Image (cartoon, rainbow, N blue to C red):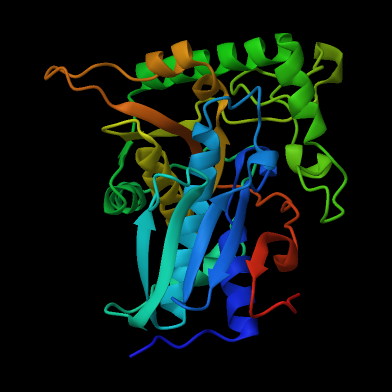
Amino acid sequence: MPTAVPDGPTLATLVSASAAAPSIHNTQPWRFRFDPDTSTLEVRAAAERGLRHTDPTGRALHVSVGCALLNLRIAVAHFAREPVTRLLPRPDEPGLLATVRLGGPARFSAAPRLYDVLWRRHSSRLPFSDRPLPGAVLAELAEAAHTEGAVLGRPEPAAADRLLRLTQEGEQRTRAHRERAAESRRWVREPDHTGLGLPPAAVGPQDHREHIPMRDFGAHRHAADLTARPFEARPRLVMLTTAHDRRADWLRAGQALQRVLLVATVHDVRASLLHQALEWPDLRERLVSAPSDDRRAHAQMVIRLGYGSEGPPSPRRPTSQALESDVLPVLP
């Protein structure tokens, strides 16, 4: 029996929910195509929105699309349909990163709390308080990552300091790299919902005590320009890793990252993503240490967690710019 095709408002909501995901520099490097014959949403890479200098391998693009894919799965389940998901379904189409078919009635009940918070989750680059995170919350975050095939580890203080040093080194390298610095500057824009990128208000202040290597999107930071804000003296870091490092693993890492961020939002825990060291292959290798069995984990994201202000959201593309459809052309 053929699967019913969703109406226009439902399809628009599915795409809007997916596009509420985080992405590096808020590039939103995804586009969607709906196939009415199979009731399937194709999730494709928007290569023109990639970062040629900062992300030459496309790893961060895949992680970003993975975040959007998790949101899409949650939204499909919210409408009581089974999200039948395939990663990299056609080897001859490398730009097709995933498909999500709207199957029959969902086998498991949707997680309403995750659907509700995906609309208001966003990164906060503001200072957090020194209030500790409960162990039960950290355990739930780790389980969220495990659900998607990744590991969320809590480094000991010495290891956390090493992560911060590597992040700082990555930040310094980026500021000194002409092409990467220029690429960062291009993605800080006044919000107009067409240019996208990060509005200046969302960039946040710099840490004048250098406790946390905040990304300098302007790539021109000077000591005299630092906004004096009290960031936490010892940030709470977690690191997301995968056992392998293929394109499919990057997509899984993105889904795990987004599930972690959504569960954090449920508990009113804020998060910011420390990409900098991950953008330099040698620094990324140094983020993890080889365990005794010689199998090496692969770092996919360093996450700073804490309690504090939400910070301003970043703009989103209209649904009509992100979705291609042969049968439902009139969308918001």
Residue 6 higher or lower than 210, as above or below: below
* x and y percentages locating residue 3 in the rendered image: 40, 85
- Nearer to the camera, 9 or 108: 9
Name the residue furthest left. Answer: 293
Q: Can residue 133 be seen in this snapshot?
A: no
Left of 84 or right of it: where is 307?
right
Name the residue furthest front. Answer: 92
Q: Quadrant of the C terminus?
A: bottom right
Left of 310 or right of it: where is 239?
left
Q: Quadrant of the N terminus?
A: bottom left
Left of 295 or right of it: where is 196?
right
Which residue is pictured at 64% across the width and 80% down the height? 327
Which residue is pictured at 31% across the width and 46% down the height? 142
Residue 188 higher or lower than 95, as above or below: above
- Nearer to the camera, 61 or 113: 61
- Nearer to the camera, 275 or 92: 92
The quarter holding residue 206 reads top right
Which residue is pictured at 64% across the width and 83% down the height? 8
* x and y percentages locating residue 86 in the rendered image: 36, 58
Which residue is pictured at 36% across the width and 50% down the height? 141
* x and y percentages locating residue 239 in the rendered image: 39, 33
* x and y percentages locating residue 256 in the rendered image: 39, 48
The quarter holding residue 224 reads top right
